Structure formats: C-alpha cells, structure tokens
Image (cartoon, helix red, strand yellow):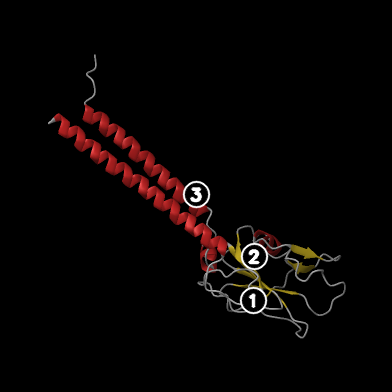
C-alpha cells in the first residue's frame, strides 16, 4: 500500500498547479490583447511588414490614416484600411470613403492622386492604377484629392513616429485615435489582471504554508 501523501507535499502540488494556471491565464490575456492592438504609429505598421495607408481630401481632412495587412494591390490596401472605394463607369477610382459624393459626372480637373513612399517625406507618383499596383511590404500608400484650383496635389509629410490622429480630422493631432487608445488600455488592463492573479496565488500559498507549518509545530 502507498503511504498517504505528506500534507506539505499536497500543498506544494496544489500551489504549483494554481501558479501554472495563473501564469497561463496572464500570458493568454496579454497575447490576445497584443494581437488585437492596431499599430499605434506608421513605423510600427511598417516594421511589422505591413503597408500604411494615408488618404487626405482637398479640404485637408484625413480620410484614412491606418495600417493595411492585406495589400495584394493598392486597391486591396485601401479596403484593408477600411476605405470605401467608389469607381465610375470606366472603372476608375472617383471617390474614397464617399468623397466626393457623388462621383463627378464629368471630369472637372479634380481626381485622386496616387503616390507611394518609404519615409513619409518623399512621395513618388504611381505609374500603375490601384488595381494593378503591387505595394511593397513596409511602404506607404498615399492618396490626395487636389483642389479645383490645382492641377494635382502631393501628400503632406507623414511622421512615422507620431501617434495616429483621428481620421476625418482637418488638423493633425498628437493623440492616438480612440480605437488605438481603447485597445491600448485593454492591453494594459489585461496584463495588470494577469500579474495580480499570479501575485494573489503566491500570497495565498505562502499564508497556507505558514499556517500548516505552525499547526505541525
């Protein structure tokens, strides 16, 4: 017959199991939060091997300023960044996120200028249409809609390290977008909970151990 397990041995086994479960919970929560966290800056997106989509309208408002993880073509990158793509009867892009709305019935000199960049400072006009271009990992897809008084436009300088401003904001903002701020808070909260669980298990284990030891003595 097997001799019964020593009380301290049972306690140690239980404590180890609880500690392992707590560590797994903390790790899982942190991992899930990190996976759901969008890139806070263009640089984060580019370093991850994705493409940054930067779209501004003729009035200076930001139509899109976010990371695209699907970028088989320039058009796919736009859609991955959450931009609604509107086309005219000839299949040409005439509106992005319903700007302008409706699409001009006739060409009036204004159109969506399509550029690419790697540093957010120097932009190269794309020689291919968005449905034919092949964005490179770690690059920027930039679009701007020229004013009626202009023949064309060039995207404004994009800081790769600045936190993402709100889309549709006419003035750059140093604060992160609500989505990024919310997810960031969720990540910190999940990590804090995980650490708290592990700490609580350790404290409980120590207290129980001391109580059992005192009773034995």
Which residue is identified by label 1?
Answer: 170
Which residue is identified by label 3?
Answer: 32
Residue occupying the far bottom of the picture:
149
Q: Which image quarter: residue 85?
A: bottom right
**Classed neighbour count for the residue bearing mark 3: other residues with Cα under 10 Å, few (<14), some (14–19), many (≥20):** few
Report the side of 200 relative to 103 (left or right): left
* Circle count: 3
Residue shown at the point (42%, 47%) measured from the top left: 27
- Percent across and percent down for residue 205 are 27, 39
Q: Secondary structure at mark 1?
A: loop
Which residue is identified by label 2?
Answer: 135
Q: Is label 2 or label 3 in front?
A: 3
Residue 49 appears in the rendering = no
Where residue 25 is drawn, which disc sits there? Answer: none
Residue shown at the point (53%, 72%) measured from the top left: 160
| 3D distance between C-alphas at marks 3 and 1 | 33 Å
| 3D distance between C-alphas at marks 1 and 2 | 27 Å
Residue shown at the point (56%, 60%) measured from the top left: 179
The N terminus, quarter of image: top left
Report the side of 117 relative to 33 (left or right): right
The C terminus, quarter of image: top left
Q: Nearer the viewer, residue 142 or 202?
A: 202
């Amino acid at each position: 017959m097997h001799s019964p397990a020593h009380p301290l041995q049972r306690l140690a086994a239980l404590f180890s199991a609880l500690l392992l479960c707590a560590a797994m919970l903390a790790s899982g929560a942190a991992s899930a939060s990190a996976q759901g966290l969008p890139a806070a800056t263009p640089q984060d997106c580019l370093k991850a091997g994705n493409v940054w989509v930067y779209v501004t309208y003729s009035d200076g408002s930001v139509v899109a300023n976010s990371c695209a993880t699907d970028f088989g073509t320039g058009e796919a990158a736009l859609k991955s960044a959450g931009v609604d793509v509107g086309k005219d009867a000839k299949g040409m892009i005439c509106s992005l996120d319903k700007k302008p709305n409706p699409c001009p019935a006739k060409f009036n000199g204004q159109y969506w200028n399509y550029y690419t960049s790697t540093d957010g400072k120097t932009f190269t006009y794309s020689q291919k249409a968005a449905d034919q271009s092949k964005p490179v990992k770690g690059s920027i897809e930039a679009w701007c809609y020229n004013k009626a008084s202009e023949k064309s436009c060039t995207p404004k300088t994009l800081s790769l390290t600045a936190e993402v401003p709100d889309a549709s904001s006419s003035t750059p903002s140093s604060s992160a977008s609500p989505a990024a701020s919310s997810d960031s808070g969720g990540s910190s909260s999940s990590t804090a909970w995980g650490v708290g669980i592990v700490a609580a298990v350790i404290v409980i284990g120590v207290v129980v151990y001391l109580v059992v030891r005192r009773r034995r003595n």
